[in-house]
Amino acid sequence: MTGFAAGSRARIALAVATAAGLALAVSACGGSSGSSAASDGTVTITVNDMPAKTDPVNRKIFLEDVAAFEKLHPKIKVVPHEGQMDPQTFATKLAGGQLENAFYVYYTDPAGLIAKHQAADITPYLSQFPAVEQVKPQLRKVFQDAGGHTYGLPEGNYSMGLVYNRALFTQAGLDPDKPPTTWDEVRADAQKIAALGKGMVGYGDYSKSNTGGWHFTAEMYSRGGDVAKQQSDGAWKADFDNATGKAVLQQLHDMRWTDDSMGQRQLLEWADLLQMMGAGKLGMYLATADNIPTIASQYKGDPKDYGLGPIPGGKGTLAGGGGFMFSPKDSPAQIKAAMAWVAFKYENPDRIEMGAQRASQAKQPVGLPEPNIWTGAAARTKSAADQKYANQPVANYAPFQQALPGIPLILEPPKAQQIYAVLDTAMAKVLTQKDADIDALLSDASKQVDSLLAAP
């Protein structure tokens, strides 16, 4: 998981329900993981991902969906829990029979859970849920093992792009419909924006609270590099003390100290760049689509002023998201019931339009390019619904949407947050010390990351 709001998934599922044809005959079976089967054949399942009381709009929507699901499936009783899978308590909950039948995980979790046999194999039941075939194959693959067996279902996704200020682009003589697609173009455009004066910053970047390492990773991916690579023996090693890593830091150093296009204020963390963008003082920064409504709602920016382009370089983009896995202690009846719930709430295109309409009425963002887990007819349905109910400037995101299919999606490295903390130092020193030794920074960070990855 990213751990940052910039990587948070939209809580409104745009595909939330299944048609009556998805109704399952669930047999009575002994309960586990907090589930039970009644004498009349009713199966009770526990699920998490219910929004907290501090998010009343989405909690209400979630509970409405529980009621609608139980009406459609009268032999299934859903007991919802707040929160998602916590790696710190997962093993204890599993051993104690307290793990939910369907539990939310981030895309960095499935590989480890599958290897440890801590999730149920749902392959035998997939044919009962044909809409799964319309989910993007690269997202489904996250929940598969080397043999092609499936252990979970995707719910949402995000990837990094370039958020930019269209108004500042126009003022600087740049085409707001053509954001930069290479890092050389980013540098050139940032200089033109900074040249506007009045405290304008052409390009912003992070270097604090793990956000610097997070962006360093995204910038490595964009250039075709990596941060950690798995070896033939299965071990992981740092993979950024190289020409690509140096190119990332050298460009930031040059933009900061030679071009003066990144501003003097540094050691920035997540909210800082959103605030600068909302104030109309920042030209560009790397982010996910959900930053834009946050800039508007929390930092008083005008959504029409912001565009979203593909990640510069385009050789890879840091991607994330999550989905649901199922307790290995589940009975077949519980697995089918839990899968029916996930399909109803998150993975069926039949009510995509209803989901968009409901989100719009609740003043939730509609029209962002992500999350979008769909391909084929379902993707077209989502696009049409977004156009019909959009409360976001959909046309401003066209450069991102058009380029994304051709950019590989790459997940975060193992022990991501710990690695990011190490890489913060390199980012901070490059942006605050004109004479920073880039080679030494990369070498020191690489040794520290190797130690992290070697630890159990």
Image (cartoon, rainbow, N blue to C red):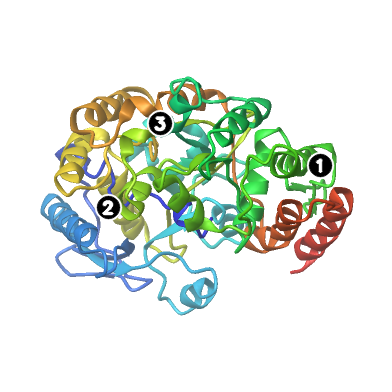
Q: Earlier in the sequence, mark 1 or mark 2?
A: 1
Q: Is residue 87 left or right of residue 352?
A: right
What's the residue type where badge 1 is placed? Lys
Residue at image point 20% right, 41% down: 355
Find the distance from the CA under tag 1 to the CA under tag 3: 32 Å
The nearer-to-camera label among 1 and 2 is 1
Residue 232, position as x, y percentages in the image? 82, 46
Which image quadrant is residue 352 in?
top left
Q: Secondary structure at mark 3?
A: helix
User: Does residue 244 show up?
Assistant: yes
Residue under label 3, please give it: 167
User: How many C-alpha atoms fall within 10 Å of the one at disc 3: few (<14), some, or many (≥20)?
Assistant: some
- In the rendered view, tell whether residue 287 sits above or below residue 99: above
Residue under label 1, please give it: 246
Residue at image point 22% right, 47% down: 24
What's the residue type where badge 3 is placed? Ala
Closest to the observer, 44 or 251: 251
- In the rendered view, tell whether residue 364 sits above or below residue 80: above
Residue 294, position as x, y percentages in the image? 36, 50
Which image quadrant is residue 453 in?
bottom right
Find the distance from the CA under tag 2 to the CA under tag 3: 44 Å
Q: Is residue 96 left or right of residue 318?
A: left
Q: Secondary structure at mark 1?
A: helix
User: How many C-alpha atoms fall within 10 Å of the one at disc 1: few (<14), some, or many (≥20)?
Assistant: some
Is the Cβ of the residue at disc 1 closer than 8 Å to that at disc 3? Answer: no
Q: Secondary structure at mark 2?
A: helix
User: Does residue 322 show up?
Assistant: no
Closest to the observer, 437 or 199: 199
Is the Cβ of the residue at disc 1 closer than 8 Å to that at disc 2? Answer: no
User: How many C-alpha atoms fall within 10 Å of the one at disc 2: few (<14), some, or many (≥20)?
Assistant: many
Q: Earlier in the sequence, mark 2 or mark 3?
A: 3
Residue under label 2, please give it: 341
